[in-house]
Image (cartoon, rainbow, N blue to C red):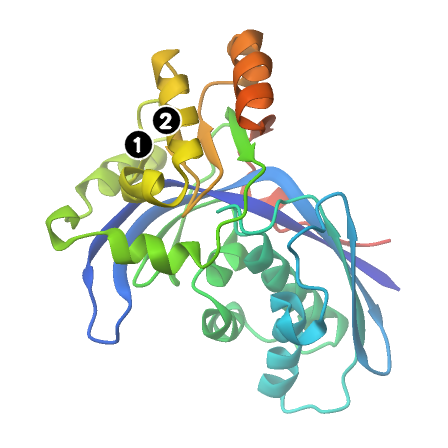
Amino acid sequence: MTLQVAAPAKLNLTFEVLGKRDDGYHEVMSLMQTIDLADTVLLDRSESLTLEVTGERVSGVPEEAKDNLAFRAALALARKAGRSDLGARIRLEKRIPAAAGLGGGSSDAAAVLRGLNQLWGLNLPIDVLTEVGAALGSDVPFFLHGGSALATGRGEVIEPLPDGASQELTLFVPDLELQDKTRRMYALVTPEEYTPGSVTKYRVDKVRAQRPLLPSDPYNIFGRHVGDLAPIVEAAMAVCDEAHLWTRLAGAGPSFFTLTPLDQIPQRLIVDILRDSYRIDALACRTLERAAALRMQEV
């Protein structure tokens, strides 16, 4: 039996930093949303744990098992279950760009946790999987829930929100790798830029009321500092703003997005400017509801 598990990308529709915690992490508040750009995780029973990485977006994805978050998730789950006899063949089919602010590695890890929990017959509850996921990375717990959610704490405390109507958007993916970008982004945020979470709370209220978000609604504090790490991304976003698009950074970048559908954006901007001048691809995406984000089936 092969178990096929969806591993969708995410967007931080809002991202606020509330302050610095005693443990060294930052307290954040974020409205998070899965989108239909997704990896596929395939799981088969095996005597040992193995990892294969294939697909159109393998660049930048760790293929050494010890460095791959999905493989580490399998090890962590086996340890949590107290079992040393568990094995699986893990295959990742990559479509989400690596280190792009879209959570691809964390989504793969969450898919492995959910899939192996079923494949191995562990039947661990979601709170236990969340505990395991939070130890792997702050974004992993969100992907165990999918859909729309409010993330607080360091990003690992998840409150699922109701699914709204599917919403079209455009994702911009630069041909750019930024080393250690998340830590560097947090280091650039000053105490004067800390916020009380009011931006996120207002958008969350809209989601709860089943009101669609407008292109002007997304917010990301990291956007103020993208020019320090990626001047070309700052320049490209400025070009989009001049074309009356509301663009916001995806996570810590370098990808960015707009809630404007791709077919409503002038082709000259997409092709002549972004693709040819800045080496940035534009992808048509849409928001993904919880059931689709958590899809798992035997194939």
Residue 246 visible here: no
Q: Position of residue 220 (x, y in %)?
A: 31, 40
Distance (Cα) linking label 2 and label 1:
7 Å
Q: Nearer the viewer, residue 147 or 168?
A: 168
Circle 2 residue: 213
Residue 153 x, y percent position in the rendering: 29, 63
Sequence order check, earlier mark of 2 and 1: 1
SS of the residue under disc 1:
helix
Question: 207 above or below 122?
Answer: above
Q: Which residue is mark 1?
A: 206
Quadrant occupied by the N terminus: bottom right
Q: Is residue 208 left or right of residue 74?
A: left
State whether residue 63 is above or below residue 271: below
Answer yes or no: do the residues labelled 2 and 1 have beta carbons within 8 Å? yes
Task: Inspect the image, locate mark 2, and give the three-letter code of the amino acid beneath it.
Answer: Leu
Along the viewing direction, whichever of 270 and 273 lies nearer the viewer: 273
Residue drawn at x 45%, y 70% as measured from the top left:
134
- Residue depth check, mark 2 versus mark 1: number of the one nearer the observer: 2
